[in-house]
Image (cartoon, rainbow, N blue to C red):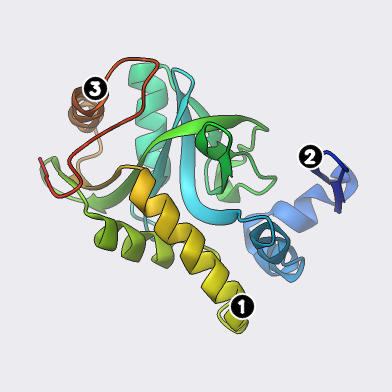
């Protein structure tokens, strides 16, 4: 794997497909972790979030939660019922661009085997919980930051890294709507979330402006 940065600020990661299985296979995360990509990214203010990343109408929806909670399931439901494209099933790079926070593809994808090189503005982050019915709550900034920290790749042995990562997560949590969603594994879960996001969104050329202290 090769990391390249140009004088214009563009950054590219090259992966020799000869080593694709060894580097990216679910059982070989230790090899990928040894590259410490998060340390390179944080120098530019970017973080890696454990999330399923889908493209819905040109905007990124990020499903995050501990492993086994249903991120891939919800992403697949959005693909089936809303025509969303799954960009990555396991990881996403978050950066602050000229138009706000963006989700970027990353060449690691867990067991989903889906990793597309696409960058999109972020519409929302959805922290998932398994439930018997669909209940969604717009989280306040403090709760959003707490949830994001738990699913962000952070080198806790490096104090400077930790401080920088927490700074970026706090900024991200303050500007992007984050929802706590206890949901089922069927189309009703998609409908509930879709209607919530539509209700919180003011026009296709504007960003979400929800009441961060409220809930649904």
Discs 1/3, front: 1
Labelled pair 3, 2 in contact (Cβ < 8 Å)? no
Instruction: Work out whether 120 lies above or below 147.
Output: above
Q: Is residue 211 left or right of residue 85?
A: left
Question: Residue 37: where, in percent of width, then height?
Answer: 71, 61
Residue under label 2, please give it: 10
Which label's residue is closer to the chain start, 1 or 3?
1
Q: Indicate whether 27 appears above or below 116.
A: below
The quarter of the picture where the C terminus appears is top left
Residue 201 locus on image (x, y percent): 27, 24
Can residue 191 be seen in the rendering of this structure? yes
SS at circle 1: helix
Residue 104 screen position, x and y as percent:
60, 39
Give above or below for 81 relative to 72. Answer: above
Alpha-carbon span between mark 1 and mark 3: 39 Å
| Residue 67 in view (yes/no) | no
Structural distance between the alpha carbons of marks 3 and 2: 33 Å
The kind of secondary structure element at disc 2 is loop
Which residue, given by chain and number where applicable, does mark 3 sit on? 198
Q: Using the image, tell me which numbered label, if any, was put on residue 160.
A: 1
Q: CA distance from mark 2 to mark 1?
A: 24 Å
Local secondary structure at mark 3: helix
């Amino acid at each position: 794997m090769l990391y390249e940065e140009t004088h214009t600020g563009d950054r590219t990661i090259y992966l020799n497909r000869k080593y694709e299985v060894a580097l990216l296979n679910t059982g070989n995360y230790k090899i990928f972790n040894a590259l410490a990509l998060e340390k390179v990214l944080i120098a530019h203010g970017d973080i890696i979030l454990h999330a399923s990343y889908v493209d819905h109408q040109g905007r990124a929806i990020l499903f995050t939660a501990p492993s086994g909670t249903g991120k891939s399931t919800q992403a697949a439901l959005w693909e089936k019922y809303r025509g969303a494209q799954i960009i990555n099933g396991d990881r996403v790079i978050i950066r602050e661009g000229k138009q706000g926070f963006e989700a970027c593809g990353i060449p690691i994808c867990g067991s989903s085997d889906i990793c597309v090189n696409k960058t999109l503005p972020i519409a929302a982050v959805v922290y998932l919980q398994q439930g018997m019915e669909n209940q969604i709550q717009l989280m306040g900034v403090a709760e959003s930051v707490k949830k994001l920290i738990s699913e962000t790749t952070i080198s806790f042995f490096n104090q400077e890294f930790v401080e920088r990562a927490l700074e970026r997560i706090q900024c991200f949590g303050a500007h992007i709507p984050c929802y706590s969603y206890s949901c089922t594994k069927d189309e009703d879960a998609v409908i509930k979330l879709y209607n919530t996001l539509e209700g919180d969104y003011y026009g296709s050329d504007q960003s979400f402006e929800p009441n961060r202290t409220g809930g649904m």
